[in-house]
Amino acid sequence: MSVTTALEKKKKDMSTKTNKGGQKKKFPFSGMWAELKKVHWPTKKELAKFTLVVIVAVIIMAVALSIIDFVLGSGFAGLYKLTGN
């Protein structure tokens, strides 16, 4: 069996498979569009609100990590000076 016939057979098998309802599937991702239509997409107002929340959270985390870095860095520098090096 050549490579092209094997690929054609696989393609044919994929196109003739049926789902639970007995309907033929055209390709493996045929249900993808139906599922995407069920998704609740946010409105522009909701999207702006969620984006603002993410930006504020990132800023808060950046400030918190900067403070922790400064405190630990100062502490280790102080310990290094105490050892006499």
Image: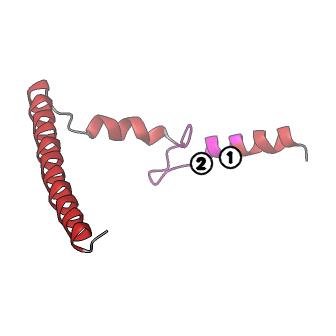
Mark 2 and mark 1: span between their CA atoms? 6 Å
Spot occupied by residue 66 in the image (x, y as percentages of width and height): 17, 50
Q: Determine whether the residue tagged by mark 2 lies in a helix, strand or loop.
A: loop
Q: Is residue 31 magenta?
A: no
Along the viewing direction, whichever of 29 and 52 lies nearer the viewer: 52
Q: Residue furthest front?
A: 84
Along the viewing direction, whichever of 81 and 59 lies nearer the viewer: 81
- Image point (69%, 40%), residue name: 11
Spot occupied by residue 26 in the image (x, y as percentages of width and height): 56, 37
Determine which residue is flagged by label 1: 13
Along the viewing direction, whichever of 69 and 52 lies nearer the viewer: 69
Callout 1 environment at 10 Å: few (<14), some (14 to 19), or many (20+)?
few
Q: Looking at numbered disc 2 in the image, what kind of residue is underneath it? A: Lys
- Image point (84%, 38%), residue name: 4
- Image point (19%, 62%), residue name: 72
Left or right placement of residue 59 versus residue 26 in this view: left
Q: Is residue 18 magenta?
A: yes
Q: Main secondary structure of the magenta part?
A: loop
Number of numbered discs on residues:
2
Q: Determine whether the residue tagged by mark 1 lies in a helix, strand or loop.
A: helix
Quarter of the image with the C terminus in it: bottom left
Q: Which mark is residue 57?
A: none
Q: Which residues are magenta?
A: 11-28
Determine which residue is flagged by label 2: 17
Evaluate if marks 2 and 1 touch, with contact meaning CB atoms under 8 Å apart: yes
Q: How is the image coloured?
A: secondary structure
